[in-house]
Image: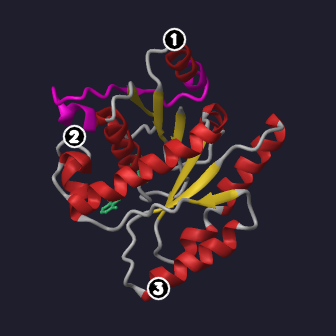
Amino acid sequence: MILASINHKGGTGKTIIAQNLAVCYAHAGAKVCIIDADPSQNSMRWFDARGDREPRIPVFSNSSHRTIRRTIEDLYSNEDYDTIIIDSPPTLERIAEEIIKVSHLVLIPITPTGGNDIWSTEQIAEEIESISKEKNQVIPSYFIINRLQPKLKVHQMFTAALEEHSKAYDIGILKSRLNLRTVVGKANLYGEGVYENNDKKATTEMVNLANEVQAIFEKL
Ligand SMILES: Nc1ncnc2c1ncn2[C@@H]1O[C@H](COP(=O)(O)OP(=O)(O)OP(=O)(O)O)[C@@H](O)[C@H]1O
Ligand SMILES: [Mg+2]
C-alpha cells in the first residue's frame, strides 16, 4: 500500500503521522519505508536519530516532482517494500500532484484549531477532485484529526464543522483521532514512534489509526 500524508498547510502532523504509521506497520511485520518528499528533511533526520533501532525503517529522500513517482513505483513493484508512506511538503506545487497520483490512499492530517484549518483544506480537496476526474477514478482520501483535546468545546465544534465541510467533497474523516500528547514529540526526537514508548493510550490511538487505514486499503 502506498500512503500519502499530505496537507499544504504546515504543522498539521504529516511527518509525525508518516513516522508513527511506519513504526506500527514495521512492528506488525510489514516491509515499510518512508519517502521524505519535504526539502526540510525532517524524516531523514528522524532516520538518523533512529540509528540501529529495530525494526529498520529506511527513509529515502526525493522531493523532485520529475522523479518521485518513478522512484515510488519502482520500490513498490520490485516488492522491496509492501508499505510506502510519503511524508509530503507543505505545498500544493507539482510535487503534491505527483504524490496524490501515485498513492492508493491520501491521508490529510488536520489540527482542530479553528476555521482556517478547515478552509485551507479546500484547495487540496479541489486538487484531489481534479486528479480523480483526470484518472477517472476516485482517489480515496481521508482527514485525520490530530492534536485533539477532546474536552475542549472548541475542538468539539471543530469536529462537527469538519463533518459538515467534508460532505461537500469526496473526503472522509477517519474514526481514529490522535490526541495532543507529549510522548509524540519525545518519540520523534529519538527516532521512534509512540508504539515504542510505553504509553498505552498513545499507542492504542496510533494502532487504531494504522488498523483503520489498513482495513480501508484492503477493501479497495
Ligand atoms: N498528536 C500530537 N501530539 C503532540 N504533538 C504533536 C502531535 N502531532 C504533531 N505534534 C507536534 O506538532 C509539530 C508539527 O508536527 P509535524 O512536524 O508532524 O507537522 P508537519 O505537518 O509535518 O509540518 P510541516 O508542514 O512543517 O512539514 C511537531 O512539533 C510535532 O512533534
Ligand atoms: Mg513535515
Mark 1 or 3, closer to the camera: 1
Q: In the image, what residue occupies the spot 48% across and 37% down?
A: 86
Q: Residue at x 64, y 37 (%)?
A: 94
Q: Which residue is mark 3?
A: 154
Identity of the residue drawn at 58% across and 45% down: 216
> Does the image show residue 14?
no
The amino acid on which the numbered mark 1 sits, given as a three-letter code, is: Asn
Mark 2, other Cα within 10 Å: few <14 / some 14–19 / many ≥20: many
Asked whether residue 179 appears in the rendered view, the answer is: yes
Determine which of the numbered discs, if any, sits on residue 192 in the image. Answer: none
For the residue pair 94 and 49, the one nearer the viewer reads as: 49
Per the image, label 3 sits on a secondary structure element best described as helix
Magenta region: which residues?
46-70
**SS class, disc 2:** loop
Q: Which mark is residue 78?
A: 1
Q: CA distance from mark 2 to mark 1?
A: 27 Å
Find disc 2 in the rendering and name its residue. Answer: 191
Q: Residues within 10 Å of mark 1 (few under 14, many from 20)?
A: few
In this view, 65 is above or below 9: above
Q: Residue at coordinates 64% horizontally, 59% vertically from top-left?
A: 172
Which quadrant of the figure contains the C terminus?
top right
- Mark 1 vs mark 3: which is more N-terminal? 1
